[in-house]
Image (cartoon, grey):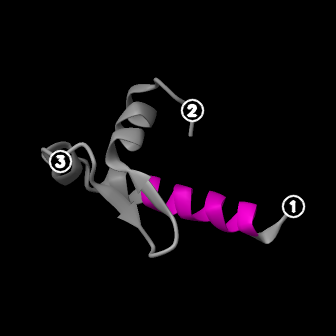
Amino acid sequence: MPIGIVAADSFRKAALGAYRNYQDTFRNLELSCWIITDGNQGIEVMEFRRIDTGEVSP
């Protein structure tokens, strides 16, 4: 498995963990375009909302 895929998967899992631990904070963000980023990769808060509601799989 290429390193980029492993790094992207690890970042996604870590960001999803942060979203779930601080759900109230992220749910109260009014802007749907907010992004959790490590400087190179980013995931929109709306994507986490979709994962959390089961619309898409993690």
Rendered position, 51 above or below 24? above
Disc 1 target residue: 1
Query: How far is the residue under mark 2 from the one under mark 1?
Result: 20 Å
Side of 34 where 42 appears, left or right = right
* Mark 3–mark 2 distance (CA, rounded to whole Å): 21 Å
Residue at x-position 40% and y-position 32%:
50
SS at mark 2 in the image: loop
Mark 1 or mark 3, which is nearer to you? 1
Query: Does dot 1 land on a helix, a strand or a loop?
Result: loop
Mark 3 sits on what residue?
24
Secondary structure mainly formed by the magenta segment:
helix
Which of the two residues, 17 or 34, is positioned nearer the viewer here? 34
Task: Locate residue 22, reporting x and y percent.
Answer: 26, 55
Instruction: Say if mark 2 contacts mark 1, CB within 8 Å.
Output: no
Quadrant (top left/top right/bottom left/bottom right) for the C terminus: top right
Query: What residue do we see at 33% from left, 47% from top?
Result: 45
When the figure is inspected, residue 32 is found, relative to residue 19, above or below; the finding is above
Q: Badge 3: few (under 14), some or many (20 or more) residues near its Cα, within 10 Å?
A: few
Circle 1 crowding by C-alpha within 10 Å: few under 14, some 14–19, many from 20? few
Residue to which mark 2 is pinned: 57
Q: Classify residue 23 as left or right of residue 52.
A: left
Residue 31: image location, x then y, percent: 17, 46
Above or below: residue 30 compared with residue 57 = below
In the displayed image of the protein, which residue is found farthest to the bottom? 39
Of marks 3 and 2, which one's residue comes earlier in the chain? 3
The CA distance from mark 1 to mark 3 is 35 Å
Q: Nearer the viewer, mark 3 or mark 2?
A: 2
Which amino acid does the dot numbered 2 rest on?
A: Ser
Mark nearer the N terminus (2 vs 1): 1
- Which residues are drawn in magenta? 4-16
